[in-house]
């Protein structure tokens, strides 16, 4: 009888540890989304050695954002930011954020990383 109670308590303890681990994982892996907040960031342009301070408010509208603003999104490189703007200029305005996956170099992994920071 006592061994049944011990086994039950051990099992409850294991379940609680597993639940704590799951909650910790979910908390640590959730993307950081900043809505309607302004941030200042320093962007170095490759064409000059000057540094420029860009004020950014997330989520960024990909139909109006500049290359410098897009480069502030973690996961977007300068090359990718240029490609997003070039695509917009060639094809026209984006109707959905998922359209950035039409750009070479932006797959599902990158898209899911940057999508919370972008809007149309």
Image (spheres, rainbow, N blue to C red):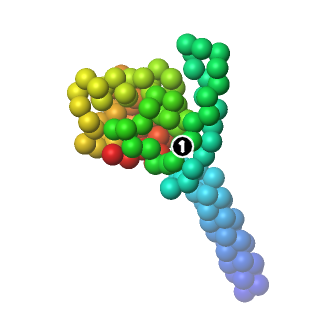
Looking at the image, which residue is at 39% across and 43% down?
Answer: 61
**Residue 67 sits above or below residue 57 on the image:** above
Looking at the image, which residue is at 25% across and 42% down?
Answer: 95
Can residue 109 be seen in this snapshot? no
Tally the marks: 1
Query: Considering the image in quadrants, where does the N terminus appear?
Result: bottom right
Q: Which residue is mark 1?
A: 56
Q: Which element is circle 1 on?
A: strand
The answer to whether residue 101 is left or right of residue 118 is left
Q: Which quarter of the figure has residue 74?
A: top right
Looking at the image, which residue is at 57% across and 36% down?
Answer: 54
Q: Position of residue 89 (x, y in %)?
A: 29, 26
| Residue nearest the viewer, comparing 24 with 117 | 117
The answer to whether residue 106 is left or right of residue 75 is left
Q: Position of residue 3 (x, y in %)?
A: 75, 79
Q: Which quarter of the figure has residue 118?
A: top left
Q: Residue furthest left?
A: 91
Looking at the image, which residue is at 46% across and 48% down?
Answer: 59
Q: Residue furthest bottom?
A: 1
| Residue nearest the viewer, comparing 65 with 79 | 65
**Residue 15 sits above or below residue 44 on the image:** below
Mark 1 closeness class: few <14, some 14–19, many ≥20 residues within 10 Å: some
Q: Position of residue 62 (x, y in %)?
A: 37, 39
The answer to whether residue 86 is left or right of residue 55 is left
Can residue 86 be seen in this snapshot? yes
Q: Position of residue 50 (x, y in %)?
A: 64, 20
């Amino acid at each position: 009888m006592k061994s049944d109670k011990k086994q039950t308590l051990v099992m409850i303890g294991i379940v609680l540890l597993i639940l704590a681990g799951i909650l910790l994982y979910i908390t640590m892996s959730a993307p950081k989304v900043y809505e309607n907040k302004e941030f200042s960031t320093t962007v170095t342009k490759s064409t000059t050695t000057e540094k420029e301070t860009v004020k950014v408010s997330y989520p960024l509208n990909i139909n109006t954002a500049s290359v410098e603003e897009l480069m502030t999104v973690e996961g977007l490189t300068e090359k990718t930011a240029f490609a997003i703007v070039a695509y917009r200029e060639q094809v026209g305005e984006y109707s959905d954020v998922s359209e950035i996956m039409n750009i070479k170099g932006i797959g599902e992994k990158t898209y899911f990383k940057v999508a919370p920071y972008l809007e149309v």
